[in-house]
């Protein structure tokens, strides 16, 4: 019975993408027979962590508009972001100009 359970669980894996039980040979490259995505959740976890990192970085940005921000703060941040973009453009332009200067 235990052996049967062992083979049963080794033979099938719940797809992390579509939630269906697909045949699985415990190979990380095995793909779901229903949706074609990798059965190993490694890629998915990596992807999710990556998305979280990107989101966290975004929220640390000084002009990031949070859902809790009031209209005034949101507008202020939009203006701040706009001027920052212009500022960066000028800096980039000046740096390029200096780099282009002879001598
Ligand atoms: Zn699937």
Image (tube, helix red, strand yellow):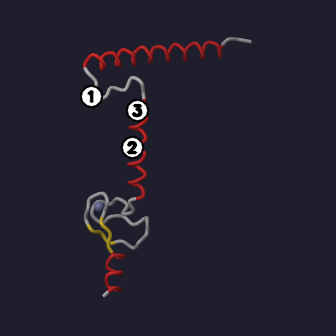
4 vs 95, left or right, is: left
52 vs 99, left or right, is: left
CA–CA distance in space, label 3 to label 2: 11 Å
CA–CA distance in space, label 2 to label 1: 21 Å
7 lies above or below 75: below
Q: Which residue is mark 3?
A: 58
Which is nearer the eye, 80 or 21? 80
Dot 3, crowdedness within 10 Å: few (<14), some or many (≥20)?
few
Find ligand 1 in the image and state its quadrant: bottom left
CA–CA distance in space, label 1 to label 3: 15 Å
Q: Residue furthest bottom?
A: 1
Which residue corresponds to the image point at 27% horizontal and 28% vertical from the top-left?
Answer: 68
Q: Which residue is mark 2?
A: 51
Dot 2, crowdedness within 10 Å: few (<14), some or many (≥20)?
few
SS of the residue under disc 3: helix
Q: Where is residue 102, by image quadrant?
A: top right
- Indicate the position of residue 46 as horizontal and vertical percent values: 43, 52
- Indicate the position of residue 60 as horizontal and vertical percent values: 42, 31
Of mark 2 and mark 1, the one earlier in the sequence is 2
Locate the N terminus and report the quarter of the image it occupies.
bottom left
Which residue corresponds to the image point at 33% horizontal and 76% vertical from the top-left?
Answer: 9
Q: Which residue is mark 1?
A: 68
């Amino acid at each position: 019975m235990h052996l049967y359970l062992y083979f049963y669980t080794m033979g099938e894996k719940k797809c992390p993408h579509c939630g269906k039980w697909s045949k699985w040979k415990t190979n990380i490259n095995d793909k779901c027979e229903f949706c074609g995505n990798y059965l190993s959740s490694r890629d998915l976890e990596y992807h999710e962590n990556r998305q979280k990192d990107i989101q966290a970085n975004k929220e640390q940005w000084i002009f990031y508009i949070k859902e809790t921000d009031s209209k005034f703060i949101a507008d202020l941040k939009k203006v701040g972001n706009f001027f920052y973009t212009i500022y960066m453009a000028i800096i980039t332009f000046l740096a390029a100009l200096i780099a282009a200067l002879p001598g």
